[in-house]
Image: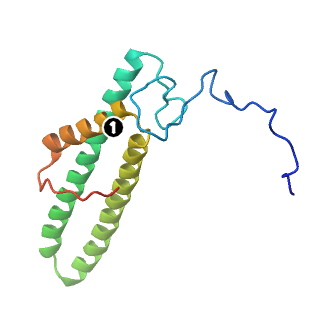
Amino acid sequence: MDHSHMDHGHMDHGNMGHGGHQCKMNMIFTWSTQDLCIIFDWWHIHSSFTLFMSLLGVVILTAGYELVRELARRYEAGASQKIQSLPGRTRGEAEQRSRMVKAAFYAVQVFYSFFIMLLFMTYNGWVMLAVAVGAFVGYLAFGNSTAAKSVACH
């Protein structure tokens, strides 16, 4: 059905489903927190306190990404060592199970990295700094390998 001939200019979608507030979607860098929503409309910044708690949450979320990466590295190293000690037929089955677990770790990391990308794409300087601080804290707490990281979403 073609609706191109219909006039929607009089319709106001400003507060539709947002509980009385309007989230701003910035496409340029800003430090403003007025009407800032982080990823979800319910994650709305109302005050300095909610900004602080949200930034703390972003730091913790981002640090958690490094935890997931470290858990994946540890699993891979342990599984590889265990598989090498197994006899032939059992080794093949263990390799298949290990591959499934590694694929699950990979999927979680990809999902997590894109979630962090969405945080960064608020284009809000405070949120961007919180992501960087979270990466720093996460690496200090969980990063037991090289600090080299490609500039990619995952």
Across and down, in percent, residue 33 comes to: 44, 24
Q: Residue at x 22, y 78 (%)?
A: 91
Q: What is the image's colouring?
A: rainbow
**Quarter placement of the C terminus:** bottom left
Question: In the picture provided, is 32 more to the left or to the right than 70?
Answer: right
Q: In which quadrant of the rendered view does residue 102 lie?
A: bottom left
Question: In the picture provided, is 39 more to the left or to the right than 17?
Answer: left
Question: In the picture provided, is 38 more to the left or to the right than 15?
Answer: left
**Quarter placement of the N terminus:** bottom right
Q: Is 48 above or below relative to 25?
A: above
Across and down, in percent, residue 144 comes to: 11, 51
Q: Is 91 above or below relative to 28?
A: below
Q: Name the residue beneath numbered marker 1.
A: 128
Across and down, in percent, residue 20 comes to: 64, 20
Q: Residue at x 31, y 74 (%)?
A: 96
Look at label 1 and name its amino acid.
Met
Across and down, in percent, residue 153 comes to: 35, 55
